[in-house]
Amino acid sequence: MKKSTIWILAIIMAIAFFGLLYLQITYLRTSVRLRSDQFDEAINRSLYQISRNLELDQTKKYLDEAFLEKQKNQSAYNRSLSRSNQLEEEIVTYNQKVNGKVTAPDGMELQVEYNLSQTIQTKPTKPVFQSPNKSGTNAISKTFVDMQEEQKKRYLNERENLNDVINKILNTSSNVPIEERINFKTLENNIRNEIKHNGIELPFQYEIVDKNDKPIYRQARFSDQDKNAVYTQVLFPNDSPDKLTYLKVYFPTKGDYLFSEVSFLVPALLFTFILLVTFIIIIFITFRQKRLSEMKNDFMNNMTHELKTPVSTISLAAQMLKDGSITKSPEVFKHISGVINDETERLSFQVEKVLQMSLFEKQKATLKLKELDANDIVVTVANTFQLKVEKFGGNLDIDLQATESAIYADKMHFTNVLFNLLDNAVKYRREDQPLELMIRTWNSNNKLLISVEDNGIGIKKEYVKKIFDRFYRVSTGNRHDVKGFGLGLAYVKKIIEEHKGSIKAESDLNKGTKFIINLPTIKEK
């Protein structure tokens, strides 16, 4: 699959995942906001009704007291009048419901409704028996009209009295302490019943404060930590502004209540997020595998080129040996034999590289560990490699400062590690300067450190961390100017890690490269 196709699919899937996450988050926020608005409306409606009920209770209390006093006065008057005119008058009682609007001194209109009980005293009339005629009908109509006029006068008088009572309430009620106007013991039950009537059953806390937010009454457990969960309602709004009191109700579990209805979306968001992370990992692995596949293809191409050259050279030399004249010339024969030997070693080296690649497929190398002296291995490798360095006009020095150089290691693999590092130094040397190589050993914190340093072409900073990846080769402009498969340093790192050690590289472009190996010593173990 082409890289562009993978990118297109990745972008489409990313847009789909992020779009799904956005829709879910938007739906969650909208649901919570709507539920919060409904909650606020229900609580505010409940608190307003509580304030309204308190006003009505207070009004009823004052009206009951006023009309009770008026009834007492009226009864005393009726009894006195009855004693003086007992034979001349009779008492008739009328009950009537009064509805109307009362205007307060500040211009506010208040709708009132009350049952009035009136007693009217009339003179008894003697029954008159006569035949129905026009004059009798007129007498009855006149009596009915007189009764209506009397009732109207009574109604107007009672309404005037009612206005006087309500004005008295408006002018004097705010002077009464709030403790006498509200029963704090029943207020909590009233709040609970009112919010339950609006479909909310949550624990709450409340307090009553004055206009300066100074508590007048507070529950012992009241604590408004979340300001968004506190609702305020003015009590007795018709009081003067300087004597207003407020009811504050706090719902500590409001947040849980709001999210309880949309809690099912949380797992959906979690699963979507897990799918998104999994998708990102898959895309990353896909690109990594594609990169490895491309590197492996490059490796196969390079390997074909590298193996074909020595095979062709050996084949040509073998054909030359068939010529009898060649055997008669020792110089030519020796030269051809040397070519065959060199190309055979080169072919063996390439095969060894292939075997190194198979080492990575096994994930874990099989090492034959035994006690070795690292300084001795370094001297042996340096002596072997000295001729190759001198061939290019270079110089190889060693500096063995390590006093504790005994390690557990696989001799063959450890030797190959040093050979790979030295071989890279020769491959990436600078043509304009003689090659200078330095191998040093020293101890630090009971560790053995080995460095291989050269004055070659160096590596750019952004490539240093990648040089230990399999099949990775730093580009030098011409892919075949330096032969290799990109396995050498990956092999070095794997072997060092299998020995419980570490390796790092330090390099500056056109100044050289330095590899530092860190291994545990036997003494440390």
Image: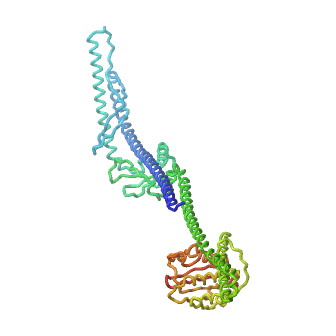
Is 347 positioned to the left or the right of 256 in the image? right
**In the figure, is residue 207 to the left or right of 398?**
left
- Quick one: 20 or 454, which is closer to the camera? 454
Pick whichever, 431 or 218, lies toward us.
431
Total residue callouts? 0
Image quadrant assignment for residue 284:
bottom right
Q: Residue at x 56, y 73 (%)?
A: 472
Residue 390: image quadrant is bottom right
Q: Is residue 278 above or below residue 42?
A: below
Q: Is residue 183 above or below residue 117?
A: below
Q: Residue at x 46, y 52 (%)?
A: 26
Residue 30 percent coordinates (x, y):
45, 50
The C terminus: image quadrant: bottom right
Q: Is residue 206 left or right of residue 318?
A: left
Task: Point out the image quarter for the N terminus.
Answer: bottom right
Position of residue 342 relative to residue 196, above or below, is: below
Q: Residue at x 37, y 47 (%)?
A: 236
Q: Is residue 24 above or below residue 318?
A: above
Which residue lies at the image location 32% right of the left edge and 50% below the top edge?
Answer: 240
Query: Where residue 137 sits: x, y (%)?
Result: 28, 13
372 and 301: which is toward the camera: 301
- Residue occupying the far top of the picture: 131
Q: Is residue 500 visible?
A: no
